[in-house]
């Protein structure tokens, strides 16, 4: 148990700003805010239109921001031999991947929810819609983190994995987007419950899928 | 550290559609050192990874009694962190054990980020990680690469001390190491040559 805590602390140190993985969570966050800022310029100062579409824009921006750190999520640890050393110490790939999902979510999920507040102001979203966006992000971002780690593990041996992982993540994230952003138009919370359920399933599958992918990559 | 043992029986290793070696049997008892020698590309590193349990052999089985420590060309130390933190991560996992920092000459480098270390310094840091692991079976893949003459002497002494304490050391290297009582395993003896296709079950032709 203390071994897992040690690994979680290292993961967090790597993924948060100042860590070794290229600015970590700061870059996706700035990217997210940049999209929210550019959208009104592109659409024009039409307040009702912005308020109507703003929630969806926040969701798309969140999804794209989640793709940014994918290529540095798992690959460096495999290249530098960390997974080999963990395996020799009896720490399973599944455990490491489960911790990586948690660390990845902590590094972009909560910061994104905070950044959604200024983004909502920029897009002129009202209080109720903002509430649904925030609950939706809370329900959906763990699923995005899980898909991200799965894909990062699957593309770990590929040289052009970065671009490929983005392409792979988008279709897998569509269900999350449909239920998460879709509940904005109905204004109800039924879709959010489905988003949360999807997230739970994805989080439950990821350690096994990711662990198997890492072991397969090591054989080569 | 008593009663550690490593035995391999009838091992074969395949890379792509090429059979690198086959029918390899070896047994290493506590206190023994074994050097695996072979020309480049014969499968030294692959054999080390099979013995460590990190790769599956194409045929045969490995029986390992005791934890294995691996030292290869990848030091598994975080590039951007100071050496003290990078080694500290492994100390947190392995428990407080002597990493022989003084002996390896790493004391002065503790505050230097790992990415600024030279090849030889990284290798010495990896040795410190291996020492701190306290595993009875050492699997060393080209341990002397990049080390200067003084560091080579230190590392040879460390391996010898490890074996005297009842540990096992298996070293894949083309450089000669002065370790008393070390036996040699020539991987070329188990190589598959194009003329030795008498066993259709194991020949590379049938694998394709």
Image (cartoon, rainbow, N blue to C red):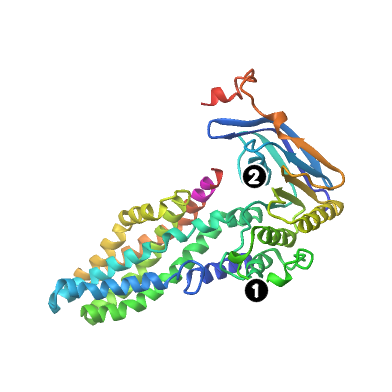
Give the quarter of the figure containing the N terminus of chain A.
bottom right
Q: Is residue B168 magenta?
A: no
Residue A136 x/y as whole percent: 31, 70
Q: Answer with mark 1 or mark 2, whichever residue precedes in sequence.
A: 2
| Magenta stretch in the rendered image | A212-217
Mark 1 and mark 2: span between their CA atoms? 32 Å
Chain holding disc 2? B
Q: Secondary structure at mark 1?
A: loop
Categorize mark 2 by other alpha carbons within 10 Å: few (<14), some (14-19), many (20+). many
For image coordinates 76% across by 36% down, the residue present is B185
Chain holding disc 1? B
Asked if both marks, 1 and 2, belong to the same chain, the answer given is yes
Q: Secondary structure at mark 2?
A: helix
Q: Quadrant of residue B119?
A: bottom right
Residue position marked by numbered label 1 in the rendering:
B111
In this picture, residue A69 sits left or right of residue A174: right
In this picture, residue A128 sits left or right of residue A70: left
In this picture, residue B181 sits left or right of residue A185: right
Q: Is residue A214 magenta?
A: yes
- Number of labels in the image equals 2
Residue position marked by numbered label 2 in the rendering:
B49
């Amino acid at each position: 148990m203390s071994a897992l805590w040690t690994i979680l602390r290292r993961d967090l140190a790597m993924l948060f700003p100042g860590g070794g993985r290229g600015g970590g969570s700061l870059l996706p966050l700035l990217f997210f805010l940049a999209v929210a800022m550019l959208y009104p310029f592109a659409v024009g100062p039409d307040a009702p239109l912005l308020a109507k579409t703003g929630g969806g824009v926040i969701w798309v921006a969140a999804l794209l921001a989640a793709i940014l750190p994918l290529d540095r999520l798992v690959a460096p640890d495999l290249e530098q031999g960390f997974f080999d050393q963990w395996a020799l110490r009896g720490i399973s790939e599944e455990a490491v991947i489960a911790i990586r999902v948690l660390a990845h979510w902590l590094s972009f999920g909560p910061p994104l929810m905070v950044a959604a507040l200024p983004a909502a102001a920029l897009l002129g979203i009202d209080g109720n819609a903002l509430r649904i966006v925030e609950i939706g992000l809370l329900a959906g971002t763990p699923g995005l983190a899980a898909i991200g780690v799965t894909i990062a593990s699957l593309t770990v041996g590929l040289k052009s994995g970065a671009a490929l992982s983005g392409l792979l993540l988008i279709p897998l994230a569509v269900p999350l987007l449909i239920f998460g952003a879709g509940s904005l138009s109905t204004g109800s919370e039924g879709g959010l419950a489905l988003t949360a359920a999807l997230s739970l399933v994805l989080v439950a599958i990821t350690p096994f899928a990711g662990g198997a992918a890492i072991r397969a990559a090591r054989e080569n | 550290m008593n009663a550690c043992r490593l035995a391999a029986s009838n091992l074969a290793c395949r890379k792509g559609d090429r059979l690198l070696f086959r029918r390899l049997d070896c047994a290493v008892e506590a206190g023994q050192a074994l050097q695996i020698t072979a020309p480049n590309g014969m499968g030294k590193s692959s054999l080390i990874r099979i013995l460590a349990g990190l790769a599956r052999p194409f045929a045969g089985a490995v029986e390992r009694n005791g934890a294995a420590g691996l030292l290869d060309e990848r030091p598994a130390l975080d590039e951007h962190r100071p050496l003290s933190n990078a080694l500290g991560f492994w100390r947190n996992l392995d428990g407080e054990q002597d990493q022989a920092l003084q002996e390896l000459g790493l004391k002065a480098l503790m505050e230097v980020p790992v990415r600024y270390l030279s090849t030889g310094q990284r290798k010495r840091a990896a040795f410190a990680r291996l020492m701190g692991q306290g595993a009875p079976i050492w699997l060393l893949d080209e341990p002397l690469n990049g080390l200067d003459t003084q560091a080579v002497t230190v590392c040879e002494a460390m391996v010898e001390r490890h074996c005297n304490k009842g540990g096992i050391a298996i070293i894949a290297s083309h450089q000669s190491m002065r370790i008393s009582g070390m036996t040699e395993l020539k991987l070329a003896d188990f190589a598959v040559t194009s003329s030795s296709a008498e066993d259709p079950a194991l020949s590379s032709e049938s694998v394709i």
